[in-house]
Image: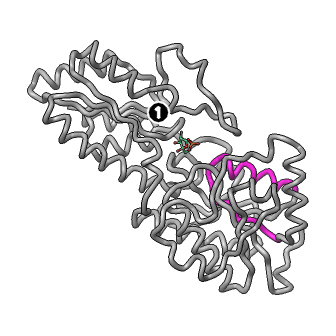
Amino acid sequence: MGHRKDLGIVRVGVLTGGGDVPGLNPAIRAVVMRLLDYGHEPVGLPRGWLGLMEGLTEPLTLESVEEIVSRGGTILGSSRTNPLKRDEDLDKCLDNIKALGLDAVVAIGGEDTLSVASNLHKLGVNTVGVPKTMDNDLSETDYTLGFDTAVNIAMDAVDRLRDTAKSHDRAIVLEVMGRHAGWVALYTGVAGGADWILIPEVAPDLDEMCDHLVRARNRGKRYAIVVASEGIDLPQAEEESVSVDAFGHVILRERGVGDFLAREIESRAGSETRSVVLGHIQRGGPPTMFDRVLGTMLGLKAADMVNAGEFGKMSAIQNNRIVAVDMERAISELKTVPIELYEEAKTLFK
Ligand code: F6P
């Protein structure tokens, strides 16, 4: 696909795919502002890959982005549409790239969205990725957009739950999102001072957890907070009924991790227990300072990469520096929590 930098103007489709997070709008804003600086022509592709499949566009002007840095969600809309599932859909995308005169596409998303971008790149499309997912599970980047905001929201929930747990001498289980990576649960539990944390990377030992909760109660701590990731293994066989999304991911909230754990804690540790599923609250509201600045830096870099013709790559943050990394490598393996980090956090369960 020809790069028209030599002609002065590059028409760049911008899309956001997968679960929305606070931080997407700052990234869109930065991509657009920098592309405009270069004299390029950004154009919005609404609702992720669905917009491209349907050949839809929407204007992305300075006016449409200049005030969105503090807004959650995404002004472009999002979807979990997977155009790689059916050849006809992929063909539609390739045809529309030509029909819309797109020289490049900036895809802001997680593993699923970027796997499409990476495959399109192999088919000759000029794609650049920006890492976004509250799960923080993309490789090749220390942080992804939306993680910091999600953890701050969940940490605030722990602070609030502690007040009510303490008043009633209860245990409360907070179920957080994060799919197959425990970053959100681990950071929330550490930052909130939880009594126990359960992450998908470590098989849950409910006896160990409940023994610990009983010991803590016996030494005078009459309440407990447990932070559990939605993706932990459950020793129950109720999983046949859960549904999957377009990328084949199990809809984890249907498994009822929080409720299950609350019942176990009540029966094994004897504490009155409640459970709270934080769900999509973690993905709403204004982005934190970190997600605003990170979105901005990653967005500026993505536009620079388009201008420089660095395709098949993703902007990323590594050791506090914004860099371009190989997109294929970023999606090849999930970045999960190292067991040592979890073991270290266990020191704080007292
Ligand atoms: O991948 C981001 C995420 O928020 C996961 O943590 C969660 O399992 C999933 O999306 C929820 O998906 P949906 O918004 O489609 O319900």
Q: Nearer the viewer, residue 244 or 134?
A: 244
Colour scheme employed for the rendering of this structure: one colour
Q: Is residue 211 left or right of residue 247?
A: left
Q: Which of the image's four quarters has the N terminus?
A: bottom right
Whole-percent x, y for residue 4 in the image: 85, 79
Q: Which residues are magenta?
A: 103-123
Q: Which residue is mark 1?
A: 230
Q: Is residue 93 left or right of residue 212?
A: right
Whole-percent x, y for residue 232 in the image: 47, 28
Q: Reply yes or no: does residue 266 show up in magenta.
A: no
Whole-percent x, y for residue 46 in the image: 70, 62
As drawn, 30 above or below 283? below
As drawn, 27 above or below 273? below
- The amino acid sitting under disc 1 is Glu
Judged from this view, the residue extending furthest toward the left is: 220
- For the point 84% across and 56% down, the residue is 93
Q: Is residue 225 left or right of residue 282?
A: left
Whole-percent x, y for residue 287 in the image: 44, 62
The quadrant where ligand 1 appears is top right
Q: Which of the image's four quarters has the C terminus?
A: top left
- Disc 1 C-beta below 8 A from ligand 1: yes
As drawn, 294 above or below 239? below
Q: Nearer the viewer, residue 282 or 206?
A: 282
Q: Residues within 10 Å of mark 1 (few under 14, many from 20)?
A: many
Looking at the rendering, which quadrant does residue 6 occupy? bottom right
- For the point 57% across and 68% down, the residue is 27
Element under label 1? Answer: loop
Looking at the rendering, which quadrant does residue 129 occupy? bottom right
